[in-house]
């Protein structure tokens, strides 16, 4: 049977764009992409890119404060022009969206600005009713913010809304304790908003290394954000222009804006998946194997819609591997067992890879190397902010099982650690590296003695099954 296309991709975000560009541009496949919103997807349009620019923008007053500490005594920060910044940000996003579209078009991909649904394992329908047949379908529609399901939640905002605000809120409540809550609290606080972070748990960033969670929580408080733990809203009401929040301890308070950062869920509804019987997991995620193949052989899925590791580079890698495997004759399974990531808080960010101390200790006996210090640059300017580095090392094999960095540019440092760990680096390998002095990163190769030994010695078979 001849098909209109070799590949029809639903979703023009990070994963879909990469898969389509490589399939068409490098391997000559006939490819189409349908995108209902803007090419570039969450990361480019309403996620990583605008978020990081906002982090930079929001920290300028701190940089100027630091300049004063270096003798630029007149350095001062005037008023912040939010509309100017927002409009410039949107122009940059338009540029990136065009670059994404051009990248696909130049690779020979047909692009459709439309929602698409699956009709059968080889047919896709656009919102105007046009149908295309295709040998393969790739679902790369990402995730959408998940709201907590409380009364009046429609009066709250989600992270997508932040990049378009008419005005910055004077007083804002962020709800949640994950990546987005921490980063947006950092941004809004930096822009001068009175920022309150309400988290239902007891320390931010559940799932991260406990020691590092404490450092992030302390920094959040020290930076002027009001952190309220073990409390969460149960009702929102509109009062004039403001929002009245009733918390689960029955306290009430008004805010200019309330922002929910309560997780995201796979965007699998109304895609026609029920027409073809693609199997979903309990969170609504599309279940895939290591080749990104779903339960229907002609249909694949990559990125947040699979809810594996919800990070842009993971979606890009899965999209690329899909193209190499299906069209390039170079089968590449996906292995996301060791993915680095960073949470862009300020002044220090948290970057992490591999096992936490708690996970490692549950698996076997590990030595913890940890060093805390005040980085030279900020110390000289008068800051007490401490940076912390942590290596988790298997006692039996000397393998570095985890690395956690809380410090300036932690993400930049950790990227290189990810290379070393991917090669199976041992602590002895770290020790052999000569330090670059004076840097923050040199601490990683100069931690001589473990601060503690945790976990119990276990046979290798048990060590590998204790933690998934
Ligand atoms: P996360 O899953 O990281 O955090 C969600 C937070 O919301 C948790 O603290 C959770 O609490 C809390 N929460 C969930 N449901 C409720 C509820 N009903 N009421 C109150 N609180 C609730 O999600 P985010 O929204 O922060 O981020 C979404 C995804 O985006 C992440 O998976 C991440 O991978 C990605 N991302 C990555 C970034 C990066 O790489 N720098 C930046 C931004 C996003 P609890 O801990 O108790 O479950």
Image (tube, rainbow, N blue to C red):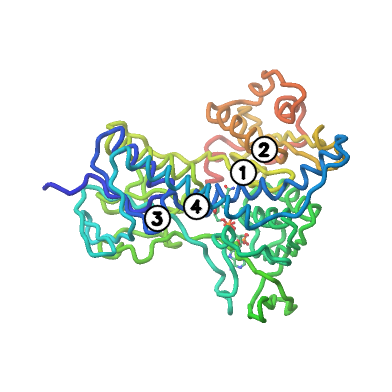
Front disc: 2 or 4 = 4
Labelled pair 2, 1 in contact (Cβ < 8 Å): yes
Residue 143: mark? none
Q: Name which of mark 4 and mark 3 comes first in the sequence.
A: 4
Q: Name which of mark 4 and mark 1 comes first in the sequence.
A: 4
x%, y% of residue 61? Answer: 77, 48
Left or right: residue 92 compared with residue 242: left
Crowding near pointer 3: few (<14 within 10 Å), some, many (20+)? many
- Read off the residue under disc 4: 45
Label 2 vs label 1: CA separation?
A: 8 Å
Crowding near pointer 1: few (<14 within 10 Å), some, many (20+)? many
Left or right: residue 436 compared with residue 133: right
Q: Name which of mark 2 and mark 1 comes first in the sequence.
A: 1
- Read off the residue under disc 2: 410
Picture layout, residue 20 above or below residue 47: above
Left or right: residue 73 compared with residue 420: right
Q: Residue at x 67, y 19 (%)?
A: 433
Front disc: 4 or 3 = 4
Q: Name which of mark 2 and mark 4 comes first in the sequence.
A: 4
Label 2 vs label 4: CA separation?
A: 24 Å
Label 3 vs label 2: CA separation?
A: 30 Å
């Amino acid at each position: 049977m001849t098909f209109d296309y070799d590949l029809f991709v639903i979703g023009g975000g990070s994963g879909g764009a990469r898969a389509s560009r490589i399939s068409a541009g490098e391997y000559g496949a006939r490819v189409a992409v349908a995108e209902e919103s803007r090419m570039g997807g969450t990361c480019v349009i309403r996620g990583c890119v605008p978020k990081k620019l906002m982090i930079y923008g929001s920290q300028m007053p701190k940089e100027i404060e630091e300049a004063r500490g270096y003798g630029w005594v007149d350095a001062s920060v005037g008023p912040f022009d939010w509309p100017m910044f927002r409009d410039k940000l949107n122009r940059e996003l338009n540029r990136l969206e065009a670059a994404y579209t051009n990248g696909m078009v130049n690779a020979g991909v047909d692009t459709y600005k439309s929602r698409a649904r699956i009709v059968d394992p080889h047919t896709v329908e656009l919102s105007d009713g046009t149908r295309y047949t295709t040998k393969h379908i790739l679902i790369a529609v990402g995730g959408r913010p998940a709201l907590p399901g409380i009364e009046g939640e429609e009066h709250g905002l989600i992270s997508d809304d932040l990049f378009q605000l008419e005005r910055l809120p004077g007083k804002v409540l962020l709800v949640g304790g994950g990546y987005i809550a921490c980063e947006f609290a950092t941004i809004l606080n930096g822009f001068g908003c009175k920022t309150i972070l309400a988290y239902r748990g007891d320390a931010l960033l559940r799932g991260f290394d406990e020691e590092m969670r404490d450092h992030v929580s302390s920094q959040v408080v020290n930076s002027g954000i009001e952190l309220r733990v073990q409390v969460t809203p149960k009702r929102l009401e509109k009062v004039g222009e403001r929002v009245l929040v009733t918390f689960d301890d029955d306290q009430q308070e008004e805010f200019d804006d309330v922002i929910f950062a309560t997780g995201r869920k796979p965007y699998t509804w109304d895609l026609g998946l029920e027409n073809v019987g693609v199997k979903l997991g309990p969170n609504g995620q599309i279940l895939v194997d290591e080749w990104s193949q779903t339960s229907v052989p002609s249909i694949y899925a990559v990125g947040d819609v699979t809810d594996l590791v919800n990070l842009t580079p993971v979606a890009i890698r899965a999209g690329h591997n899909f193209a190499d495997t299906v069209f390039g004759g170079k089968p590449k399974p996906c292995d996301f067992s060791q993915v680095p990531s960073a949470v862009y808080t300020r002044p220090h960010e948290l970057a992490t890879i591999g096992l936490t101390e708690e996970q490692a200790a549950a698996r076997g006996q590990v030595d913890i190397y940890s060093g805390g210090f005040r980085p030279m640059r900020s110390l000289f300017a008068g800051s007490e902010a401490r940076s912390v580095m942590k290596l988790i090392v298997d006692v039996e094999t000397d393998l570095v099982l985890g690395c956690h960095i809380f410090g300036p540019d932690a993400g930049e440092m950790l990227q290189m650690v990810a290379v070393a760990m991917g090669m199976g680096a041992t602590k002895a390998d770290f020790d052999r590296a000569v330090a670059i002095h004076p840097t923050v990163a040199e601490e990683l190769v100069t931690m001589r003695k473990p601060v503690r030994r945790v976990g119990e010695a276990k046979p290798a078979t048990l060590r590998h099954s204790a933690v998934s």
